[in-house]
Image (spheres, helix red, strand yellow):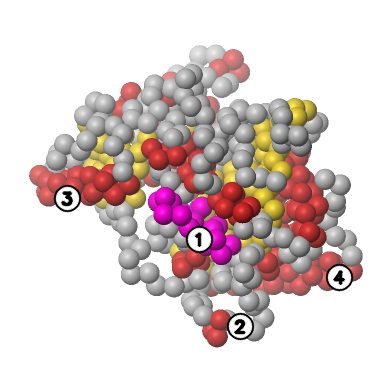
Amino acid sequence: MNGSAATSEEGESKKSNQWTRREAMKAMGAAGLASLAPQVSSAADRPESRPAAPDQPNILFILTDDHAVQGLSCYGSRLMETPGLDRIAEEGVRFDNAFVTNSLCAPSRASMLTGKYSHEHGVTENIFGDKEPFDNTQMTFPKRLQEAGYTTLQVGKWHLESDPSGFDYWKRLPNQGRYYDPVFLEKPEDGGEPNRFQESGYVTDIIVQDTIDLIEEHRGEGEPFCMLSWHKAPHRGWKPAERHEDLFTNAPFPPPPTFNDDYFSRASPATHAEMSIANMPDWADEQPDGLSEMERKHWNYQRYMKEYQRTVKAFDEGVERLLDYLDETGLADNTLVVYATDNGMFIGEHGYYDKRFMYEESIRIPLLMRYPPVIEPGTVEDRVVRNIDFAPTFMDIAGVEIPDEVQGRSLRPLMEGREQADWDEPLYYHYYEYPGPHKVRPHYGIRTERYKLIYYYTVEEWELFDLRRDPHELQNVVDAPKYRSVVRDLKEEIQARRDQYGDTTGKDVPL
Protein backbone atom coordinates (compact mmCIF):
# COMPACT_ATOMS: atom_id res chain seq x y z
CA MET A 1 0.00 0.00 0.00
CA ASN A 2 2.43 2.59 -1.21
CA GLY A 3 0.03 4.82 -3.13
CA SER A 4 -0.68 8.43 -2.17
CA ALA A 5 -3.39 10.98 -2.87
CA ALA A 6 -3.22 12.83 -6.18
CA THR A 7 -1.54 16.24 -6.11
CA SER A 8 -1.65 17.16 -9.80
CA GLU A 9 -2.99 20.45 -11.16
CA GLU A 10 -6.02 18.54 -12.41
CA GLY A 11 -6.63 17.19 -8.89
CA GLU A 12 -6.30 20.67 -7.37
CA SER A 13 -8.80 22.01 -9.90
CA LYS A 14 -11.31 19.32 -9.01
CA LYS A 15 -10.77 20.03 -5.32
CA SER A 16 -11.43 23.73 -5.91
CA ASN A 17 -14.66 22.97 -7.76
CA GLN A 18 -15.82 20.65 -5.01
CA TRP A 19 -15.13 23.25 -2.33
CA THR A 20 -17.09 25.86 -4.25
CA ARG A 21 -20.06 23.53 -4.49
CA ARG A 22 -19.80 22.57 -0.82
CA GLU A 23 -19.65 26.15 0.42
CA ALA A 24 -22.69 27.02 -1.68
CA MET A 25 -24.64 24.21 -0.08
CA LYS A 26 -23.55 25.31 3.39
CA ALA A 27 -24.84 28.80 2.68
CA MET A 28 -28.19 27.40 1.59
CA GLY A 29 -28.21 25.22 4.70
CA ALA A 30 -29.16 28.21 6.83
CA ALA A 31 -32.68 27.80 5.50
CA GLY A 32 -32.75 24.19 6.76
CA LEU A 33 -31.66 20.89 5.31
CA ALA A 34 -35.20 19.92 4.43
CA SER A 35 -35.47 22.78 1.95
CA LEU A 36 -32.63 21.26 -0.08
CA ALA A 37 -34.53 18.09 -0.91
CA PRO A 38 -36.13 18.35 -4.37
CA GLN A 39 -37.30 14.93 -5.55
CA VAL A 40 -35.52 13.73 -8.70
CA SER A 41 -36.96 10.45 -9.89
CA SER A 42 -35.75 10.07 -13.47
CA ALA A 43 -32.74 10.80 -15.64
CA ALA A 44 -34.84 13.28 -17.62
CA ASP A 45 -35.38 15.38 -14.50
CA ARG A 46 -31.74 15.31 -13.46
CA PRO A 47 -29.75 18.52 -14.01
CA GLU A 48 -27.21 18.24 -16.83
CA SER A 49 -24.34 18.78 -14.37
CA ARG A 50 -25.23 15.56 -12.55
CA PRO A 51 -23.51 12.44 -13.92
CA ALA A 52 -25.42 9.37 -15.03
CA ALA A 53 -25.37 6.52 -12.53
CA PRO A 54 -22.74 3.93 -13.47
CA ASP A 55 -23.66 0.25 -13.57
CA GLN A 56 -21.11 -0.59 -10.87
CA PRO A 57 -20.13 2.40 -8.74
CA ASN A 58 -17.42 2.26 -6.12
CA ILE A 59 -18.62 1.85 -2.54
CA LEU A 60 -16.98 3.33 0.55
CA PHE A 61 -18.72 2.09 3.71
CA ILE A 62 -17.49 3.95 6.80
CA LEU A 63 -18.57 2.46 10.14
CA THR A 64 -17.97 3.54 13.72
CA ASP A 65 -18.70 1.77 17.00
CA ASP A 66 -21.25 3.15 19.51
CA HIS A 67 -21.66 6.60 17.95
CA ALA A 68 -24.76 8.28 19.36
CA VAL A 69 -26.92 10.09 16.83
CA GLN A 70 -27.31 12.77 19.53
CA GLY A 71 -23.65 13.68 18.97
CA LEU A 72 -23.78 14.74 15.30
CA SER A 73 -24.37 18.39 14.49
CA CYS A 74 -26.08 17.46 11.21
CA TYR A 75 -28.77 15.83 13.38
CA GLY A 76 -29.15 19.01 15.40
CA SER A 77 -26.76 18.21 18.25
CA ARG A 78 -25.25 21.10 20.19
CA LEU A 79 -22.69 18.90 21.94
CA MET A 80 -20.01 19.38 19.28
CA GLU A 81 -19.55 20.24 15.62
CA THR A 82 -18.98 17.36 13.19
CA PRO A 83 -18.15 19.11 9.90
CA GLY A 84 -16.86 15.97 8.17
CA LEU A 85 -20.05 14.02 8.78
CA ASP A 86 -22.18 17.10 8.17
CA ARG A 87 -20.60 17.35 4.74
CA ILE A 88 -21.98 13.92 3.75
CA ALA A 89 -25.44 15.05 4.86
CA GLU A 90 -25.14 18.34 2.98
CA GLU A 91 -24.00 16.63 -0.19
CA GLY A 92 -26.30 13.62 0.11
CA VAL A 93 -29.08 12.22 2.26
CA ARG A 94 -29.61 12.10 6.02
CA PHE A 95 -31.82 9.27 7.25
CA ASP A 96 -33.69 10.40 10.35
CA ASN A 97 -35.22 7.06 11.28
CA ALA A 98 -32.45 4.50 10.89
CA PHE A 99 -32.45 1.68 13.45
CA VAL A 100 -30.62 -1.50 14.39
CA THR A 101 -32.43 -4.79 14.98
CA ASN A 102 -30.21 -5.87 17.91
CA SER A 103 -28.25 -3.12 19.64
CA LEU A 104 -24.94 -4.87 20.15
CA CYS A 105 -21.71 -4.73 18.14
CA ALA A 106 -21.19 -8.24 16.76
CA PRO A 107 -24.87 -9.01 15.99
CA SER A 108 -25.33 -5.67 14.24
CA ARG A 109 -22.22 -6.05 12.10
CA ALA A 110 -23.33 -9.53 11.07
CA SER A 111 -26.75 -8.11 10.12
CA MET A 112 -25.12 -5.41 8.01
CA LEU A 113 -23.04 -8.01 6.17
CA THR A 114 -25.85 -10.50 5.56
CA GLY A 115 -29.06 -8.47 5.51
CA LYS A 116 -30.57 -10.85 8.07
CA TYR A 117 -31.78 -10.84 11.66
CA SER A 118 -29.60 -12.26 14.43
CA HIS A 119 -31.49 -15.54 14.70
CA GLU A 120 -30.82 -16.15 10.99
CA HIS A 121 -27.12 -15.28 10.72
CA GLY A 122 -26.35 -16.90 14.07
CA VAL A 123 -24.75 -14.03 16.02
CA THR A 124 -27.23 -13.17 18.74
CA GLU A 125 -24.68 -11.89 21.27
CA ASN A 126 -21.14 -10.61 21.42
CA ILE A 127 -18.55 -13.36 21.54
CA PHE A 128 -18.48 -14.75 25.08
CA GLY A 129 -17.41 -18.17 26.35
CA ASP A 130 -18.86 -20.95 24.23
CA LYS A 131 -20.74 -18.68 21.83
CA GLU A 132 -20.01 -19.47 18.20
CA PRO A 133 -18.17 -16.90 16.08
CA PHE A 134 -19.71 -15.53 12.91
CA ASP A 135 -20.06 -18.26 10.29
CA ASN A 136 -17.96 -16.73 7.53
CA THR A 137 -19.06 -19.35 4.99
CA GLN A 138 -22.52 -17.80 4.69
CA MET A 139 -23.62 -15.26 2.12
CA THR A 140 -22.49 -11.65 2.64
CA PHE A 141 -22.68 -8.61 0.41
CA PRO A 142 -18.85 -8.43 -0.02
CA LYS A 143 -18.91 -11.99 -1.40
CA ARG A 144 -21.69 -11.13 -3.82
CA LEU A 145 -19.87 -8.01 -4.99
CA GLN A 146 -16.58 -9.87 -5.31
CA GLU A 147 -18.31 -12.44 -7.53
CA ALA A 148 -19.62 -9.55 -9.64
CA GLY A 149 -16.11 -8.21 -10.31
CA TYR A 150 -15.59 -5.82 -7.40
CA THR A 151 -12.28 -5.50 -5.61
CA THR A 152 -13.34 -5.95 -1.99
CA LEU A 153 -11.27 -4.42 0.82
CA GLN A 154 -11.59 -4.10 4.60
CA VAL A 155 -9.55 -2.31 7.24
CA GLY A 156 -10.16 -1.63 10.93
CA LYS A 157 -12.50 -3.11 13.50
CA TRP A 158 -14.22 -6.41 12.66
CA HIS A 159 -15.37 -7.83 16.01
CA LEU A 160 -16.77 -11.09 14.63
CA GLU A 161 -13.95 -13.37 15.83
CA SER A 162 -13.81 -15.42 12.62
CA ASP A 163 -11.69 -13.82 9.89
CA PRO A 164 -13.28 -11.76 7.14
CA SER A 165 -14.27 -13.75 4.05
CA GLY A 166 -15.02 -12.52 0.55
CA PHE A 167 -12.33 -9.83 0.59
CA ASP A 168 -9.35 -9.47 -1.74
CA TYR A 169 -7.54 -7.84 1.16
CA TRP A 170 -8.31 -7.26 4.80
CA LYS A 171 -6.51 -5.86 7.81
CA ARG A 172 -8.45 -6.06 11.04
CA LEU A 173 -8.08 -5.27 14.71
CA PRO A 174 -8.20 -8.34 16.95
CA ASN A 175 -11.23 -8.24 19.24
CA GLN A 176 -11.84 -4.62 20.35
CA GLY A 177 -8.40 -3.37 19.37
CA ARG A 178 -6.77 -0.45 21.12
CA TYR A 179 -6.49 3.26 20.46
CA TYR A 180 -2.69 3.65 20.61
CA ASP A 181 -0.06 1.55 18.83
CA PRO A 182 -2.65 -1.01 17.75
CA VAL A 183 -2.02 -4.61 16.77
CA PHE A 184 -3.48 -5.75 13.44
CA LEU A 185 -4.19 -9.08 11.79
CA GLU A 186 -3.73 -9.15 8.01
CA LYS A 187 -5.03 -11.53 5.35
CA PRO A 188 -2.29 -14.06 4.55
CA GLU A 189 -1.27 -14.52 0.94
CA ASP A 190 -0.86 -18.29 1.27
CA GLY A 191 -4.15 -19.00 3.05
CA GLY A 192 -2.41 -19.79 6.34
CA GLU A 193 -2.59 -17.97 9.64
CA PRO A 194 -3.15 -14.18 9.50
CA ASN A 195 -0.09 -11.96 9.69
CA ARG A 196 0.10 -10.26 13.10
CA PHE A 197 1.95 -7.00 13.62
CA GLN A 198 1.87 -3.75 15.57
CA GLU A 199 1.84 -0.20 14.20
CA SER A 200 2.79 3.02 15.93
CA GLY A 201 0.24 5.79 16.07
CA TYR A 202 -3.40 6.51 16.77
CA VAL A 203 -5.81 3.86 15.51
CA THR A 204 -8.26 6.26 13.83
CA ASP A 205 -5.51 8.00 11.86
CA ILE A 206 -4.01 4.65 10.83
CA ILE A 207 -7.35 3.32 9.54
CA VAL A 208 -8.03 6.52 7.59
CA GLN A 209 -4.60 6.44 5.95
CA ASP A 210 -4.94 2.73 5.17
CA THR A 211 -8.32 3.41 3.57
CA ILE A 212 -6.80 6.03 1.29
CA ASP A 213 -3.77 3.89 0.46
CA LEU A 214 -5.86 0.83 -0.38
CA ILE A 215 -8.20 2.76 -2.65
CA GLU A 216 -5.25 4.44 -4.33
CA GLU A 217 -3.53 1.11 -4.86
CA HIS A 218 -6.55 -0.58 -6.44
CA ARG A 219 -8.49 2.19 -8.19
CA GLY A 220 -6.49 1.99 -11.40
CA GLU A 221 -7.10 -1.72 -11.95
CA GLY A 222 -10.26 -1.22 -14.01
CA GLU A 223 -12.57 -2.82 -11.45
CA PRO A 224 -14.91 -1.02 -9.05
CA PHE A 225 -13.96 -1.23 -5.39
CA CYS A 226 -15.97 -1.88 -2.26
CA MET A 227 -14.01 -0.50 0.71
CA LEU A 228 -15.09 -1.14 4.30
CA SER A 229 -13.40 1.45 6.53
CA TRP A 230 -14.52 0.24 9.97
CA HIS A 231 -13.38 2.20 13.02
CA LYS A 232 -12.89 1.51 16.72
CA ALA A 233 -13.95 5.01 17.77
CA PRO A 234 -15.84 5.96 19.83
CA HIS A 235 -16.06 2.63 21.68
CA ARG A 236 -15.47 2.45 25.43
CA GLY A 237 -11.93 2.68 26.70
CA TRP A 238 -12.00 6.18 25.22
CA LYS A 239 -8.54 7.53 24.52
CA PRO A 240 -8.35 10.64 22.35
CA ALA A 241 -5.59 11.51 19.93
CA GLU A 242 -2.86 13.56 21.62
CA ARG A 243 -3.87 16.62 19.61
CA HIS A 244 -7.33 16.50 21.23
CA GLU A 245 -6.43 15.74 24.85
CA ASP A 246 -7.32 19.26 26.00
CA LEU A 247 -10.46 19.63 23.87
CA PHE A 248 -13.56 20.67 25.85
CA THR A 249 -11.50 21.21 29.02
CA ASN A 250 -13.38 24.40 29.89
CA ALA A 251 -16.66 23.52 28.16
CA PRO A 252 -19.01 21.56 30.44
CA PHE A 253 -21.64 19.44 28.70
CA PRO A 254 -25.29 19.97 29.64
CA PRO A 255 -26.99 16.77 30.85
CA PRO A 256 -29.87 15.49 28.69
CA PRO A 257 -33.48 16.01 29.86
CA THR A 258 -33.81 12.41 31.10
CA PHE A 259 -30.52 12.39 33.00
CA ASN A 260 -32.27 11.95 36.36
CA ASP A 261 -34.88 9.44 35.20
CA ASP A 262 -36.25 7.61 38.27
CA TYR A 263 -37.76 4.73 36.20
CA PHE A 264 -41.11 5.19 37.92
CA SER A 265 -43.80 3.07 36.22
CA ARG A 266 -41.23 1.14 34.22
CA ALA A 267 -40.65 -2.60 34.08
CA SER A 268 -38.04 -3.97 36.49
CA PRO A 269 -35.28 -4.42 33.84
CA ALA A 270 -34.84 -0.62 33.79
CA THR A 271 -33.48 -0.69 37.34
CA HIS A 272 -31.96 -4.17 37.17
CA ALA A 273 -29.49 -3.14 34.46
CA GLU A 274 -25.95 -2.18 35.48
CA MET A 275 -25.20 0.80 33.26
CA SER A 276 -25.69 3.75 35.57
CA ILE A 277 -23.38 6.70 34.97
CA ALA A 278 -23.24 7.26 38.72
CA ASN A 279 -21.55 3.86 39.08
CA MET A 280 -19.22 3.91 36.08
CA PRO A 281 -15.96 2.26 37.17
CA ASP A 282 -13.82 3.85 34.44
CA TRP A 283 -12.36 6.70 36.50
CA ALA A 284 -13.14 5.59 40.06
CA ASP A 285 -9.53 6.08 41.17
CA GLU A 286 -9.50 9.67 39.88
CA GLN A 287 -12.69 10.93 41.51
CA PRO A 288 -12.45 13.46 44.34
CA ASP A 289 -13.10 12.06 47.79
CA GLY A 290 -16.38 12.60 49.60
CA LEU A 291 -18.70 12.95 46.59
CA SER A 292 -22.38 12.22 47.08
CA GLU A 293 -24.04 9.85 44.60
CA MET A 294 -25.47 12.78 42.60
CA GLU A 295 -22.13 14.61 42.62
CA ARG A 296 -20.39 11.44 41.47
CA LYS A 297 -22.96 11.04 38.69
CA HIS A 298 -22.32 14.55 37.38
CA TRP A 299 -18.55 14.15 37.72
CA ASN A 300 -18.61 10.89 35.75
CA TYR A 301 -20.88 12.39 33.11
CA GLN A 302 -18.54 15.28 32.37
CA ARG A 303 -15.54 12.99 32.16
CA TYR A 304 -17.44 10.48 30.02
CA MET A 305 -18.67 13.10 27.57
CA LYS A 306 -15.31 14.80 27.16
CA GLU A 307 -13.41 11.58 26.49
CA TYR A 308 -16.18 10.26 24.23
CA GLN A 309 -16.44 13.39 22.10
CA ARG A 310 -12.66 13.75 21.89
CA THR A 311 -12.46 10.35 20.20
CA VAL A 312 -15.22 11.42 17.80
CA LYS A 313 -13.22 14.52 16.84
CA ALA A 314 -10.32 12.56 15.31
CA PHE A 315 -12.75 10.38 13.40
CA ASP A 316 -14.63 13.37 12.01
CA GLU A 317 -11.33 14.86 10.83
CA GLY A 318 -10.65 11.54 9.12
CA VAL A 319 -13.97 11.72 7.27
CA GLU A 320 -12.96 15.13 5.91
CA ARG A 321 -9.69 13.62 4.66
CA LEU A 322 -11.50 10.75 2.95
CA LEU A 323 -14.00 13.06 1.23
CA ASP A 324 -11.22 15.41 0.11
CA TYR A 325 -9.31 12.44 -1.31
CA LEU A 326 -12.34 11.30 -3.33
CA ASP A 327 -12.82 14.85 -4.65
CA GLU A 328 -9.15 15.34 -5.53
CA THR A 329 -8.90 12.06 -7.43
CA GLY A 330 -12.14 12.47 -9.36
CA LEU A 331 -13.71 9.48 -7.63
CA ALA A 332 -16.49 11.41 -5.85
CA ASP A 333 -19.06 11.23 -8.66
CA ASN A 334 -18.57 7.49 -9.08
CA THR A 335 -18.52 6.47 -5.41
CA LEU A 336 -21.35 5.75 -3.00
CA VAL A 337 -20.20 6.97 0.43
CA VAL A 338 -22.10 5.53 3.37
CA TYR A 339 -21.61 6.46 7.01
CA ALA A 340 -23.26 4.55 9.86
CA THR A 341 -22.51 3.14 13.29
CA ASP A 342 -23.12 -0.38 14.57
CA ASN A 343 -25.59 0.63 17.27
CA GLY A 344 -26.85 3.62 19.17
CA MET A 345 -25.52 4.76 22.53
CA PHE A 346 -26.75 6.29 25.75
CA ILE A 347 -24.68 9.36 26.52
CA GLY A 348 -26.49 10.29 29.72
CA GLU A 349 -30.09 9.67 28.65
CA HIS A 350 -32.02 7.87 31.42
CA GLY A 351 -28.83 8.15 33.48
CA TYR A 352 -27.26 5.39 31.35
CA TYR A 353 -24.17 4.69 29.32
CA ASP A 354 -23.83 1.81 26.79
CA LYS A 355 -26.84 0.59 24.69
CA ARG A 356 -28.83 -2.77 24.45
CA PHE A 357 -32.28 -1.56 25.52
CA MET A 358 -34.97 -0.97 22.89
CA TYR A 359 -35.12 2.68 23.94
CA GLU A 360 -34.65 5.24 21.19
CA GLU A 361 -31.09 6.35 21.99
CA SER A 362 -29.90 2.74 21.91
CA ILE A 363 -31.54 1.57 18.67
CA ARG A 364 -31.43 4.74 16.55
CA ILE A 365 -28.28 5.25 14.49
CA PRO A 366 -26.92 7.96 12.20
CA LEU A 367 -27.07 6.99 8.54
CA LEU A 368 -25.69 9.30 5.87
CA MET A 369 -25.15 8.61 2.16
CA ARG A 370 -23.60 10.57 -0.69
CA TYR A 371 -23.93 9.43 -4.29
CA PRO A 372 -24.26 12.34 -6.74
CA PRO A 373 -25.85 10.43 -9.65
CA VAL A 374 -29.00 9.55 -7.69
CA ILE A 375 -29.05 11.48 -4.38
CA GLU A 376 -30.01 15.14 -4.30
CA PRO A 377 -27.82 17.22 -1.94
CA GLY A 378 -29.44 18.02 1.38
CA THR A 379 -32.12 15.32 1.17
CA VAL A 380 -33.77 14.32 4.46
CA GLU A 381 -35.47 10.92 4.56
CA ASP A 382 -37.79 10.11 7.46
CA ARG A 383 -39.04 6.65 6.49
CA VAL A 384 -37.90 3.80 8.75
CA VAL A 385 -34.80 1.91 7.61
CA ARG A 386 -32.83 -0.85 9.35
CA ASN A 387 -29.32 -2.23 9.45
CA ILE A 388 -30.55 -5.35 7.63
CA ASP A 389 -31.28 -3.04 4.68
CA PHE A 390 -27.60 -2.23 4.10
CA ALA A 391 -26.60 -5.47 2.34
CA PRO A 392 -29.44 -5.46 -0.21
CA THR A 393 -28.79 -1.77 -0.88
CA PHE A 394 -25.14 -2.41 -1.76
CA MET A 395 -26.09 -5.35 -3.95
CA ASP A 396 -28.80 -3.34 -5.72
CA ILE A 397 -26.50 -0.39 -6.37
CA ALA A 398 -23.88 -2.80 -7.76
CA GLY A 399 -26.39 -4.46 -10.08
CA VAL A 400 -26.22 -7.76 -8.18
CA GLU A 401 -29.26 -9.98 -7.71
CA ILE A 402 -30.45 -9.99 -4.09
CA PRO A 403 -30.83 -13.56 -2.74
CA ASP A 404 -34.19 -14.64 -1.35
CA GLU A 405 -32.62 -15.32 2.05
CA VAL A 406 -32.01 -11.59 2.59
CA GLN A 407 -34.62 -10.16 4.98
CA GLY A 408 -33.86 -6.48 4.42
CA ARG A 409 -34.89 -4.20 1.57
CA SER A 410 -32.81 -2.08 -0.79
CA LEU A 411 -32.81 1.61 0.12
CA ARG A 412 -32.24 2.65 -3.48
CA PRO A 413 -35.85 3.83 -4.03
CA LEU A 414 -35.50 6.11 -1.00
CA MET A 415 -32.10 7.35 -2.16
CA GLU A 416 -33.70 8.28 -5.48
CA GLY A 417 -36.65 10.01 -3.82
CA ARG A 418 -39.23 7.58 -5.20
CA GLU A 419 -42.59 6.99 -3.57
CA GLN A 420 -42.96 3.50 -2.08
CA ALA A 421 -46.54 2.76 -1.09
CA ASP A 422 -45.63 -0.47 0.70
CA TRP A 423 -42.65 0.89 2.66
CA ASP A 424 -44.47 1.63 5.91
CA GLU A 425 -43.44 -1.34 8.06
CA PRO A 426 -42.90 -1.30 11.83
CA LEU A 427 -39.48 -2.07 13.30
CA TYR A 428 -39.10 -5.51 14.87
CA TYR A 429 -36.27 -5.71 17.42
CA HIS A 430 -34.76 -8.57 19.45
CA TYR A 431 -31.98 -8.33 22.06
CA TYR A 432 -30.53 -11.51 23.62
CA GLU A 433 -27.37 -11.12 25.71
CA TYR A 434 -27.70 -11.84 29.44
CA PRO A 435 -26.20 -11.51 31.91
CA GLY A 436 -23.05 -10.47 30.06
CA PRO A 437 -21.95 -6.94 30.81
CA HIS A 438 -24.63 -4.62 32.17
CA LYS A 439 -27.35 -7.21 32.89
CA VAL A 440 -29.92 -5.96 30.41
CA ARG A 441 -32.76 -8.50 30.27
CA PRO A 442 -33.47 -10.19 26.91
CA HIS A 443 -36.42 -8.64 25.14
CA TYR A 444 -38.11 -8.15 21.82
CA GLY A 445 -40.64 -5.63 20.62
CA ILE A 446 -42.26 -3.59 17.91
CA ARG A 447 -41.92 0.10 17.10
CA THR A 448 -44.53 1.82 14.95
CA GLU A 449 -44.67 5.49 14.07
CA ARG A 450 -46.54 6.22 17.31
CA TYR A 451 -46.07 3.30 19.71
CA LYS A 452 -43.40 1.02 21.08
CA LEU A 453 -44.25 -2.24 22.87
CA ILE A 454 -41.41 -4.17 24.58
CA TYR A 455 -41.63 -7.67 26.06
CA TYR A 456 -38.98 -8.74 28.60
CA TYR A 457 -39.80 -12.39 28.17
CA THR A 458 -37.53 -13.92 30.84
CA VAL A 459 -39.37 -11.98 33.55
CA GLU A 460 -42.65 -11.65 31.61
CA GLU A 461 -42.93 -7.88 31.93
CA TRP A 462 -44.05 -5.31 29.37
CA GLU A 463 -43.46 -1.67 28.54
CA LEU A 464 -45.60 0.47 26.24
CA PHE A 465 -44.63 3.98 25.21
CA ASP A 466 -46.78 6.48 23.34
CA LEU A 467 -43.99 8.13 21.37
CA ARG A 468 -46.17 11.02 20.26
CA ARG A 469 -47.06 12.04 23.80
CA ASP A 470 -43.93 10.72 25.50
CA PRO A 471 -40.98 10.95 23.08
CA HIS A 472 -38.46 10.54 25.92
CA GLU A 473 -40.03 7.21 26.95
CA LEU A 474 -40.58 8.03 30.61
CA GLN A 475 -44.14 6.75 31.10
CA ASN A 476 -44.90 3.06 30.74
CA VAL A 477 -48.63 3.00 29.92
CA VAL A 478 -49.02 -0.73 29.29
CA ASP A 479 -51.59 -1.06 32.09
CA ALA A 480 -53.56 2.09 31.29
CA PRO A 481 -57.17 1.19 30.31
CA LYS A 482 -57.18 3.62 27.37
CA TYR A 483 -54.32 1.66 25.72
CA ARG A 484 -55.85 -1.79 26.13
CA SER A 485 -56.73 -2.17 22.47
CA VAL A 486 -53.35 -0.74 21.42
CA VAL A 487 -51.55 -3.38 23.48
CA ARG A 488 -53.68 -6.14 21.96
CA ASP A 489 -53.02 -4.96 18.41
CA LEU A 490 -49.29 -4.53 19.00
CA LYS A 491 -48.96 -8.01 20.50
CA GLU A 492 -50.53 -9.39 17.34
CA GLU A 493 -48.16 -7.26 15.30
CA ILE A 494 -45.14 -8.65 17.15
CA GLN A 495 -46.28 -12.20 16.50
CA ALA A 496 -46.88 -11.41 12.84
CA ARG A 497 -43.31 -10.11 12.49
CA ARG A 498 -41.87 -13.09 14.35
CA ASP A 499 -43.70 -15.31 11.89
CA GLN A 500 -42.59 -13.19 8.94
CA TYR A 501 -38.91 -13.34 9.90
CA GLY A 502 -38.99 -16.90 11.26
CA ASP A 503 -37.93 -15.88 14.76
CA THR A 504 -38.73 -18.71 17.15
CA THR A 505 -36.10 -17.68 19.73
CA GLY A 506 -37.22 -16.50 23.16
CA LYS A 507 -40.73 -17.08 24.48
CA ASP A 508 -43.82 -16.81 22.30
CA VAL A 509 -45.99 -13.73 22.63
CA PRO A 510 -48.72 -14.27 25.24
CA LEU A 511 -51.68 -12.93 23.27
Q: Which residue is mark 1?
A: 401
Among the 4 quarters of the image, the one containing residue 11: bottom right
User: Disc 2 vs disc 1: which is toward the camera?
Assistant: 1
| Most foreground residue, 304 or 67 | 67
Front tag of 4 and 1:
1
Q: Which of pointers 4 and 1 lies earlier in the amino acid sequence?
A: 4
Vertical position of residue 37 compared to residue 235: above or below? below
Amino acid type of the residue that numbered disc 4 sits on in the rendered structure: Glu
Does the residue at mark 2 contact the one at mark 3 (Cβ under 8 Å)?
no
Under mark 1, the amino acid is Glu
Which disc, if any, is residue 10?
Answer: 4
Q: Say few, some or many: other residues with alpha carbon within 10 Å of mark 3 (under 14 / 14 to 19 / 20 or more).
A: few
| Percent position of residue 73, x then y | 56, 53
Q: Residue at x 48, y 27 (%)?
A: 132
Structural distance between the alpha carbons of marks 2 and 3: 46 Å
Disc 4 on helix, strand or loop? helix
285 up-or-down from 206: above or below? above
The span shown in magenta is 387-407
The Cα–Cα distance between marks 2 and 1, rounded to whole angstroms, is 29 Å
- Disc 1 on helix, strand or loop? loop
Q: CA distance from mark 4 to mark 3?
A: 61 Å
Mark 2 sits on what residue? Answer: 47
- The numbered mark, 2 or 4, whose residue comes first in the sequence reads 4
Query: Residue 404 colored magenta?
Result: yes
Numbered mark located on residue 489 in the image: 3
